Image: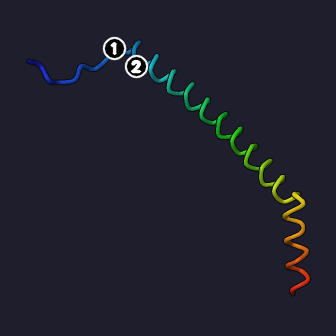
Amino acid sequence: MNTNPKIPDAETRAKSVARLREVCLMFDALNMTLDEAIASAEAHIRNSSLNRRRQERGNKLN
């Protein structure tokens, strides 16, 4: 029984590399989307009325 891994041919390696690059670009796009969503959520929290009241109350205590 042969347990040595078979090295794929050049065409198969090239396809795999191209697909991996594609996947990396997809992950980059997903990360950008998530960054935008996080920024939007943080802005929403900063501008919420509850947060403003807490800040005003904190400023009165200082």
Q: Which of 52 and 32 is in front in this view?
A: 52
Residue that extends furthest to the bottom in the rendered view of this protein: 62
* Residue at 83% across, 54% down: 43
Picture quarter containing residue 4?
top left
Residue that extends furthest to the left in the rendered view of this protein: 1
Name the colour scheme.
Answer: rainbow
> x and y percent of residue 55 in the render?
86, 72
Task: Answer few, some or many: residues within 10 Å of disc 2's Cα (few below 14, many 20 plus, some between 14 and 19).
Answer: few
Given contact means CB atoms under 8 Å apart, are the residues at marks 2 and 1 in contact?
Answer: yes
Q: Which mark is residue 21?
A: none
* Residue at 47% across, 24% down: 17
Horizontal side of 28 relative to 12 (left or right) equals: right
* Vertical arrangement, residue 42 with respect to residue 34, above or below: below
* Vertical arrangement, residue 5 with respect to residue 32, above or below: above
> x and y percent of residue 59 in the render?
89, 80
Q: Nearer the viewer, residue 22 or 34?
A: 34
* Residue at 78% across, 54% down: 42
Which residue corresponds to mark 2? 13
Badge 2 amino acid = Arg
* Vertical arrangement, residue 21 with respect to residue 40, above or below: above
Q: Quadrant of the N terminus?
A: top left
Which residue corresponds to mark 1? 9
Circle 1 sits in a helix, a strand or a loop, which is it? loop
> x and y percent of residue 52 in the render?
89, 66
* Residue at 84% across, 52% down: 44
Badge 1 amino acid = Asp
Between the residue at mark 2 and the residue at mark 1, the CA separation in whole angstroms equals 6 Å
Q: Nearer the viewer, residue 39 or 41?
A: 41
